């Protein structure tokens, strides 16, 4: 694992965006693995700016998002599909038909998981996967105890994650407890992995990811197995290393 420690979240976003810009400049038809959460938002803004200044284009790009809440249709404002449209897809020249988010309203979620794996495979696999990290070390919605070789599946969210993400839901609004998420094995299959983390509340998770044992109780520690993974973190997130 390569670890890049930068001063603050703005530098992390810029560094991360540059990795994706270089990727698209060297392979215009890249398959990108994308993430939600607050951390990647500034990186997406960097990509939108790069497209507007004609440094990159998304015309031939295919994307696969890590995860989605099970029980939310893609029109729901808290769905990850809605988030991706708002934060990136609506602002770039991508063909939306080439953007994929696990279907939160699938009639048969188990079949949908198998189908998602097949779609990734038939796109030729993911060239570069973007990740954030949960305070408990989760990646995508692979909560602690996730199998280190798991594939896309339905996963129950932990109370910690539900509480952390409650800030996005209005008081009294239905908040799903289930998700569809790429598995850790799916993530490890990406040719390159870029994990962003900022802020002191991620310091324990980063410590466990980098210096802890490889173990299911810290899903991100599985990145120790990846031969082309980079952690781009700020000083606060690195403060316990
Ligand atoms: C959610 C997402 C993860 C993300 C995490 C951290 O649980 N499923 O992919 O990494 O939130 O989010 P944030 O960047 O807002 O801290």
Image: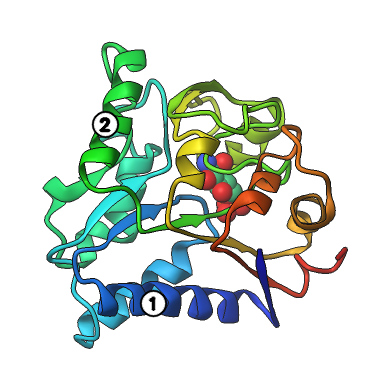
Q: Farthest residue toward the right?
A: 240
Q: Who's the residue at 70% across and 26% down the image?
A: 145
> Which quarter of the rendered picture does the N terminus lie within?
bottom right
Q: Which mark is residue 118?
A: 2
Q: Nearer the viewer, mark 2 or mark 1?
A: 2
213 relative to 178 in the view: left or right: right
Q: Please give the residue where the numbered disc 1 appears in the rendered image.
A: 46
Check the image and report above or below for 217 versus 172.
below
Please state which of residues 109 and 184 is positioned toward the viewer in this rendering.
Answer: 184
- Categorize mark 1 by other alpha carbons within 10 Å: few (<14), some (14-19), many (20+): many
User: Quadrant location of residue 141?
Assistant: top right
Q: Position of residue 35 (x, y in %)?
A: 44, 51
Q: Position of residue 110 (x, y in %)?
A: 36, 14
Check the image and report above or below for 217 versus 230.
above
Please state which of residues 25 and 47 is positioned toward the viewer in this rendering.
Answer: 25
Q: Who's the residue at 45% across and 35% down the image?
A: 182
Per the model, the C-alpha gap separating discs 2 and 1 is 30 Å
Kind of element beneath mark 1: helix
Q: Position of residue 9 (x, y in %)?
A: 62, 74
Q: Which mark is residue 31?
A: none
220 relative to 20 in the view: left or right: right
> Which quarter of the rendered picture does the C terminus lie within?
bottom right
Can residue 31 be seen at all in this image of the molecule?
Answer: yes
- Categorize mark 2 by other alpha carbons within 10 Å: few (<14), some (14-19), many (20+): few
Q: Give the mark nearest the N terminus, 2 or 1.
A: 1
């Amino acid at each position: 694992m390569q670890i890049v420690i930068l001063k603050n979240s703005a530098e992390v976003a810029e560094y991360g965006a540059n990795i994706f810009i270089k990727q698209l400049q060297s392979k215009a038809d890249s398959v990108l693995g994308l993430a939600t959460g607050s951390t990647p938002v500034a990186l997406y803004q960097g990509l939108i700016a790069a497209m507007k200044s004609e440094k990159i284009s998304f015309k031939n790009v295919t994307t696969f998002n890590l995860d989605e809440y099970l029980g939310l249709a893609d029109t729901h404002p808290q769905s990850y599909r809605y988030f991706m449209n708002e934060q990136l897809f609506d602002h770039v020249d991508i063909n939306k038909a080439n953007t994929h988010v696990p279907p939160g309203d699938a009639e048969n979620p188990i079949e949908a998981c198998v189908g998602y794996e097949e779609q990734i495979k038939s796109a030729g696999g993911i060239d570069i996967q973007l990740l954030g990290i949960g305070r408990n070390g989760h990646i995508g919605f692979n909560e602690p105890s996730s199998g280190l070789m798991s594939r896309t599946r339905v996963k129950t969210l932990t109370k910690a994650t539900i509480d952390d993400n409650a800030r996005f839901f209005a008081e009294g609004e239905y908040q799903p407890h289930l998700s569809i998420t790429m598995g850790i094995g799916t993530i490890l299959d990406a040719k390159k992995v870029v994990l962003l983390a900022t802020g002191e509340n991620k310091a324990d998770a980063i410590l466990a990811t980098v210096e802890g044992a490889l173990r299911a109780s810290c899903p991100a520690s599985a990145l120790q197995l990846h031969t082309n993974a980079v952690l781009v973190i700020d000083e606060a997130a690195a403060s316990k290393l």
